[in-house]
């Protein structure tokens, strides 16, 4: 791969026009963020979507690293005096790091090996003679006797032959074509076998992997990670197996090309090279690649789940009571208003005596009426079931117009004890902060969940077993994508939310909040330029994603970028409107009707602007202040509780998707135990992955197909629900 060919290679691989690739690469190299390029540089990139730009950026980094590694290898081999035109061409031709490293392996500096020692003894010519296989008469020892050299510890002909065999074993197994051949064979025919150590697995967590075997080509990522976990705990012994006799014979067939006096010796050397060097190296490589691919899949699933969770519709406008259940220490309670400000807090004792429960009920009823609570958010942890019983009885006994929902409290305790929580809620106990988080995360999931380490949110599989650096990088990207997709209210957003806006880092985010605290609310986007360390370059990246309601510039409450304000104003004028009309409800309704009649192509010509920009301006003007999550279904709320004993096979229930894994979907159906829709029960058609069918936050009608009360498991089906009943 040559540097000048990178763009063309990416264009071919991603099936994108070369000019689009060139434009996008230029923008990336200039320091523009992916969200900014995707939203505000559509004309330049030919409207490449964010996902395409991220794939492009990833491949660009990979291929540039490849070219850098090629240069390092070429220089290294050249310094050894072994670089030929043929070798140079082969290196420059590679498009994969694995191919490149295979070519480099024979020239790579490594610890002294048996073959190196044999070469130092002057035995390489004998090894080469044996590999040529041209001699058909005489004996090997007669030839080898010429290489006896006591000074170099070659005492006998047998010593010379043994050294030559070591050279053959290493040189043949380091040949790129041989490694590529066996690698392909092992991927097609290899098996992963496991043996369980019962003493080190007393809880039988890895029972299914007792004397287990599966082809590596069919091994799904979640099983790879489970096997790795078992191996790490010492509960499993794992090995890659293959038909070694068959593979060694194939090895012979590739390298022993004619009859000679060396045939048997070559077979012995090749067999030794296969068993001692080639297979163990490829076993390590394949195990490593299986793990890498499985981790990448797990990280991708976590990322997809997290994005869907972050983009769930907010339940705005509610006064919410957050309940963080508990037994010994009681149920922590916090009430927040529609903006998330704390109105009241305390502790309820609802799992103790009847008297304590009755007093708690009176207290909650009083608070609901005093603050006009319309929604109760119950954490799904310890004592959640009892808290839900308490809540449903309170609603029913008092005929309250209040709904409740069970909220995942994953990460609430992590947030409560964090430095950020201390800064945000310095006057509240750590336990109350948890209840506040549980209440706020249904008002605006995105704004609250970004405060929590994504790994603690619990919407993945084996997230603690994967490469943590890769996981963090992916999750940061997912959060950045979600936050910039939605946009942020500049005058209310926390620093934790602001730091994910394109171009803004943690330090600048804190400076924005500090400026706001000192000077009051921002009146317009331009005022951002007064913030310390927020210069023009950063302003260009971030401005379009920050919203100001009731500011001095109406366009500041839309996704229209300041660089396009002039175009937007000209468009309004052509339609007979002014900027002030955006904030006038009656005028806005008339404007919306006229905007529907505008032809973007014709208007773009009239305004001498790009069609994508004009199209986006039209959409933005029609819905100032719009939250894109408004189009999504609201979370499922309840008034009555469902018990496990009440659930019968064949019952149709409505629930919310909480987590998605490779093997199925976990659904909250209103009881403590989440039900599982196995991948085979998602559709009558073959489903490649559950993410192709459902998303986190989806509300589904599901059929109960089995209930195992002893093991606390519920099996659900999506495919067996009659079509007319599906949500």
Image: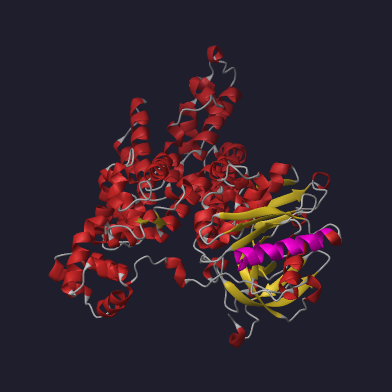
Q: Quadrant of residue 607?
A: bottom left
Magenta-highlighted residues: 356-377
Viewer-nearest residue: 415 or 712: 415
Q: Is residue 17 visible?
A: yes
- Front-lying residue, 440 or 604: 440
Instruction: Characterize the magenta stretch by its predominant secondary structure.
Output: helix
Q: Position of residue 172 (x, y in %)?
A: 50, 39
When the figure is inspected, residue 86 is found, relative to residue 455, above or below; the finding is above
Q: Residue at x 79, y 76 (%)?
A: 646
Residue positioned 56% across, 49% down in the render: 452
Q: Quadrant of residue 56?
A: bottom left
- For the C terminus, the image quarter is bottom right
Q: Residue furthest top?
A: 151
Badge count = 0
Residue 593 in magenta? no
Q: Position of residue 369 (x, y in %)?
A: 65, 67
Residue 360 highlighted magenta (yes or no): yes
Q: Nearer the viewer, residue 509 or 105?
A: 509
Q: Give the percent coordinates (x, y) of residue 414.
A: 62, 46
Q: In percent of the image, x 81 and y 51: which residue is there?
A: 203
The residue positioned 33% from the left and 35% from the top of the image is: 71
Q: Pick the residue in front: 663 or 405.
A: 405
């Amino acid at each position: 791969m040559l540097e000048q060919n990178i763009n063309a290679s990416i264009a071919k691989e991603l099936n994108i026009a070369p000019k689009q690739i060139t434009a996008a690469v230029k923008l990336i190299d200039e320091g523009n963020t992916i969200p900014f390029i995707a939203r505000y540089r559509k004309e330049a990139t030919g409207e490449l979507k964010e996902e395409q730009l991220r794939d492009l950026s990833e491949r660009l980094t990979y291929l540039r690293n490849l070219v850098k590694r090629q240069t390092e290898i070429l220089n290294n081999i050249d310094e050894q005096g072994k670089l030929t035109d043929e070798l140079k061409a082969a290196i420059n031709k590679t498009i994969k790091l694995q191919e490149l490293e295979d070519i480099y392996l024979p020239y790579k500096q490594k610890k002294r090996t048996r073959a190196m020692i044999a070469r130092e003894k002057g035995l390489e010519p004998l090894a080469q003679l044996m590999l040529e296989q041209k001699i058909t008469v005489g004996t090997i020892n007669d030839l080898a006797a010429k290489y006896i050299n006591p000074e170099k510890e070659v005492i006998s002909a047998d010593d010379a032959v043994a050294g030559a065999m070591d050279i053959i074993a290493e040189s043949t197994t380091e040949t790129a074509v041989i490694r590529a051949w066996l690698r392909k064979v092992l991927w097609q025919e290899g098996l992963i076998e496991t043996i369980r150590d019962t003493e080190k697995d007393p809880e039988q967590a890895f029972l299914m992997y007792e004397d287990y075997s599966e082809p590596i080509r069919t091994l799904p990522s979640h099983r790879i990670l489970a096997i790795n976990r078992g191996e790490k705990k010492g509960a499993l012994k794992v090995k890659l197996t293959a038909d070694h006799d068959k593979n060694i014979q194939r090895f012979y067939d590739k390298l022993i090309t004619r009859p000679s006096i060396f045939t048997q010796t070559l077979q012995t050397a090749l067999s030794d090279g296969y068993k001692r060097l080639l297979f163990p190296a490829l076993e390590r490589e394949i195990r490593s690649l299986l793990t890498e691919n499985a981790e990448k899949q797990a990280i991708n699933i976590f990322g997809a789940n997290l994005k869907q969770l972050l983009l769930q519709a907010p339940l705005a406008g509610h006064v919410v009571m957050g309940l963080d259940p508990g037994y010994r220490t009681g149920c922590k309670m916090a009430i927040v208003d529609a903006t998330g400000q704390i109105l009241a807090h305390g502790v309820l004792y609802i799992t103790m005596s009847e008297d304590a429960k009755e007093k708690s009920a009176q207290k909650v009823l009083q608070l609901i009426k005093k603050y006009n609570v319309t929604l109760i958010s119950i954490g799904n942890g310890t004592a959640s079931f009892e808290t839900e019983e308490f809540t449903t009885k309170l609603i029913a006994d008092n005929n309250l117009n209040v709904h409740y929902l069970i909220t995942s409290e994953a990460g609430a305790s992590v947030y409560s004890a964090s430095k950020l929580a201390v800064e945000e809620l310095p006057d509240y106990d750590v336990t109350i902060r948890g209840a506040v988080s549980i209440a706020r995360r249904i008002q605006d999931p995105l704004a609250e969940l970004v405060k929590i380490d994504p790994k603690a949110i619990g919407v993945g599989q084996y997230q603690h077993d994967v490469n943590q650096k890769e996981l963090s990088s992916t999750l940061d990207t997912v959060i950045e994508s979600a936050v910039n997709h939605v946009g942020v209210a500049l005058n209310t957003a926390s620093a934790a939310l602001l730091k994910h806006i394109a171009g803004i880092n943690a330090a600048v985010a804190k400076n924005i909040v500090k400026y706001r605290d000192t000077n009051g609310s921002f009146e317009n986007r331009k005022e951002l330029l007064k913030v310390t360390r927020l210069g023009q370059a950063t302003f260009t990246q971030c401005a379009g994603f920050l919203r100001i309601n009731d500011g001095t510039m109406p366009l500041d409450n839309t996704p229209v970028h300041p660089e396009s304000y002039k175009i937007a104003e000209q468009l309004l004028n052509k339609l007979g409107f002014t900027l002030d009309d955006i904030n006038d409800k009656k005028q806005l309704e008339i404007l919306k009707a006229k905007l529907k009649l505008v032809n973007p192509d014709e208007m773009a010509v009239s305004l001498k602007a790009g069609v994508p920009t004009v199209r986006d301006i039209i959409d933005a003007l029609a819905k100032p202040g719009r939250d894109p999550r408004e189009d999504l279904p609201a979370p499922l709320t309840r008034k009555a509780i469902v018990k496990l004993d009440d659930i019968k096979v064949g019952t149709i229930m409505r629930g919310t998707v909480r987590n998605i894994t490779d093997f199925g979907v976990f659904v909250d159906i209103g009881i403590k135990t989440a039900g599982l829709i196995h991948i085979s029960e998602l559709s009558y058609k073959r489903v490649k992955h559950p993410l192709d069918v459902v998303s986190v936050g989806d509300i589904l009608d599901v059929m109960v197909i089995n209930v195992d009360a002893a093991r606390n498991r519920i099996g659900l089906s999506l495919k067996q629900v009659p079509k007319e009943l599906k949500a």
